Image: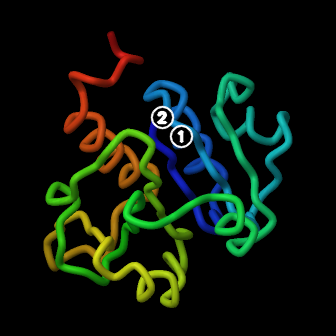
Amino acid sequence: MYNLVLVNPQIPNNTGAIGRLCVNAGAALHLIKPIGFDIDEKAVRRAGLDYWDKLDLHVWENIEEFFEHNQISGNAYFATTKTQKPYFEANFKEGDYIFFGSETAGIPESILNQYKEQNITIPMTKEGRSLNLAISTGIVLYEAIKQNYTSFKKFQ
């Protein structure tokens, strides 16, 4: 199982789509507050995830609480536009944490600097500045699954 970590997500439909992605990929979803919307069942259902109850969801009060309860070292990658290392050069392993920042601010600079060697990006042309958060999580998560597919029991 992989762990998708959303740091301060702002758009409910993105998080709903990412939740759906996690259920179908067998990944856990970690949401780090503050969150820009209500995540009660009724609100999430309106955002497009009618099986939110099947999601392995973890909600953290802040980034400090998340790091206190999760051992993060070489088992994590941090998606950002502020690096040149493409995501497909990462060596993903089952259980890894894949971090994505908010739609408006990305992952805090202090975290990116602390884990600089583990920063990854999705290559894009110069015409765009970023991809939609839900699309980005799908691209990277399924690369991780592809790299470990033969040992990934959930799909067998």
Q: Which mark is residue 84?
A: none
Residue 119: give x, y in percent of width and height. Answer: 32, 73
- The structure residue drawn at horizontal position 17% and vertical position 55%, both measured from the top left corner, is 88
Instruction: Name the residue beneath numbered marker 1.
Output: 17
Foreground label between 1 and 2: 2
Kind of element beneath mark 1? helix
Q: Look at label 1 and name its amino acid.
A: Ala
Residue 53: give x, y in percent of width and height. Answer: 74, 25
Question: Is 102 drawn above or below residue 46 in the view shown?
Answer: below
Which picture quadrant has residue 56? Answer: top right
Q: Is residue 34 visible in the rendered structure shown here?
A: no
Of all residues, the one furthest to the top in this rendering is 156
Nearer to the camera, 156 or 43: 156
- The structure residue drawn at horizontal position 24% and vertical position 27%, both measured from the top left corner, is 149
Instruction: Name the residue beneath numbered marker 2.
Output: 21
Question: Is 76 drawn above or below residue 119 in the view shown?
Answer: above
Which picture quadrant has residue 154? Answer: top left
Nearer to the camera, 128 or 19: 19
Kind of element beneath mark 2? helix
The reply to whether discs 1 and 2 touch (Cβ–Cβ < 8 Å) is: yes
Number of marks? 2
Q: Look at label 2 and name its amino acid.
A: Leu
Which picture quadrant has residue 156? Answer: top left
Q: CA distance from mark 1 to mark 2?
A: 6 Å
Residue 32: give x, y in percent of width and height. Answer: 69, 63
- The structure residue drawn at horizontal position 37% and vertical position 17%, both measured from the top left corner, is 153
Q: Is residue 146 left or right of residue 9?
A: left
Residue 38: give x, y in percent of width and height. Answer: 82, 53
Which class describes the residues within 10 Å of circle 1: few (<14), some (14-19), or many (20+)? some
Nearer to the camera, 83 or 151: 151
